[in-house]
Amino acid sequence: MYHSASRSDGLGSALQIAGCGQSCKIGNQIVGSANPLGLSEALTFAERAGLDLKKVLEGIRRGSAGNMIMELFGPGGIAESLVKDLGMGLDLLESEEERAVALPGASLCKQLLCGMIANGDEKLGLQGLVTVIERINDIQK
């Protein structure tokens, strides 16, 4: 069973290991930020291709890419908090050479979330990633 970051029993209790809750939360944030990034890119691609976005979303929802995070695509953790959590995970792994692991997706999501903050969207959740992707592609709304 998957645990969400908002559950009162905490992510660490899923592993039943004392002190691992923060690391589990960071892992949850890595997955939770990657999925909306893909959805943001898909929607930007579909818009540029002239597709009906509601139909595209419905098709994705019914296909193999449909998932719980997509259903929750809306207000969630705010960009400021997500940058903090992803940054803690990236900093931790850089500081412990023997446990170092490359996390290019988490690093990219952190950079895009920093772009949201720079653009004044620091209070948006992950759904705000689409604003950064749109800006990169010069799509103005």
Image (spheres, grey):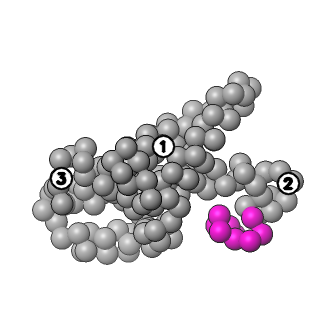
Above/below status of 35 relative to 135? below
Amino acid at dot 2: Ile
The verdict on residue 9 being magenta is yes
Task: From this view, report whether residue 105 is shown above or below residue 131.
Answer: above
For the question of whether residue 38 can be seen, the reply is no
Amino acid at dot 1 = Lys
Examine the image and state in which quarter residue 46 appears. bottom left
Q: Where is residue 35 in the image (x, y as percent from the top left)?
A: 45, 57
> What's the magenta region?
1-10
> Mark 2 — residue?
17
In front of the other: label 2 or label 1?
A: 1
Which residue is at the front of the view, 65 or 18? 18
**Distance from the alpha carbon under mark 3 to that under mark 1:** 21 Å
Mark sitting earlier along the chain (3/2): 2
For this rendering, which residue is in front, 78 or 99?
78
Label 2 secondary element: loop
Q: x and y percent of residue 8 in the render?
A: 74, 71
Q: Name the residue under label 1.
A: 110
Which residue appears farthest toward the front when viewing the image? 120
Q: What's the CA distance linking mark 3 and mark 2? A: 46 Å
Question: The residue tagged with tag 3: helix, strand or loop?
Answer: loop
> Which residue is labeled 3 in the image?
139
Residue 69 visible? The answer is yes
Disc on res. 15: none
Q: Residue 120 versus residue 133: which sits nearer the camera? A: 120
Residue 131 at x, y percent in the picture: 30, 55
Circle 2 crowding by C-alpha within 10 Å: few under 14, some 14–19, many from 20: few
Of mark 3 and mark 1, the one earlier in the sequence is 1
